[in-house]
Amino acid sequence: MTALGARHAGISRRRWLLASLGIPLFRARAAETLQVSFDGDNLHVAAPGLHFLTGKPLERLRDADTVDFLSQLTLYSDEYVTVFRRTPERIIVSYDLWEEKFAVSIPGAAARSTSHLGAAQAENWVIEGLAVSALGMDPNRQFWLKFELKTANHRDLSRLMGEKGISLGGLLDWMTRRGPDDLYWTRDAGPWRLVDLPRIRTTRNG
């Protein structure tokens, strides 16, 4: 083989290696986006690769502490600039040391709760139970979604929670701040159109 041929072979092998390494990376990034479905009124999401009952939150739960999270699901009428609608939620998680199972409650007007779940089951129950109304949106118009989740301490809750629930203005400002002990997760999706989404029937238990 000539020096030029050897060089081309080396480049080809290098490109093949980089391409093969890029395949799982691409799949991992694709798995981090939100999955979106529509029930005719509300948009629902799923994020199978998102795990928040790990690390410090899990340590606190195993120390018999209760962990609070605040989330918001935001619907944009353009690429993450103009908010069409936003839905906040408070999520309360506890852990049964004897059974090694999680209990989750989401207070509010449509309060719901569940228990005796593994970590992945609890995470999926939380995210798949979130929804944001799409009423009034043109079915043929593109939209974007963003999901955010952040741990909240007692001081945060006292400042953000009121008689009517979570302060939207306060939550928006709080979500953008990052303290040394703050844990924050986010996923997004788009562009989508309502006419292209799979339709689901809402039959939630718990």
Image (cartoon, rainbow, N blue to C red):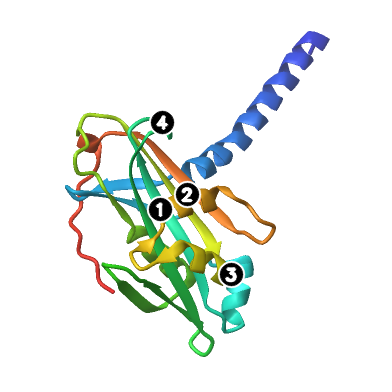
Q: Residues within 10 Å of mark 4 (few under 14, many from 20)?
A: some
- Whether residue 47 sits left or right of residue 200 in the image: it is right
Q: Residues within 10 Å of mark 1 (few under 14, many from 20)?
A: some
Q: Secondary structure at mark 2?
A: helix
Query: Which one is nearer the viewer's eye here, 9 or 71?
Result: 71
Q: Count every numbered label the image shows and give the total.
A: 4
The dot on residue 197 is none
Residue type, label 3: Pro
Q: Which residue is mark 2?
A: 172
Q: Which residue is mark 3?
A: 57
Q: Which residue is mark 1?
A: 168
Q: Are marks 3 and 4 in contact (CB under 8 Å)?
A: no
Q: Secondary structure at mark 1?
A: helix
Residue type, label 2: Leu
Q: Are marks 1 and 2 in contact (CB under 8 Å)?
A: yes
Q: Earlier in the sequence, mark 4 or mark 1?
A: 4
Quadrant location of the C terminus? bottom left
The residues bearing labels 4 and 1 have C-alpha atoms spaced at a distance of 20 Å
Q: Which residue is mark 4?
A: 79
The residues bearing labels 3 and 1 have C-alpha atoms spaced at a distance of 24 Å
Mark 3 or mark 2, which is nearer to you? 2
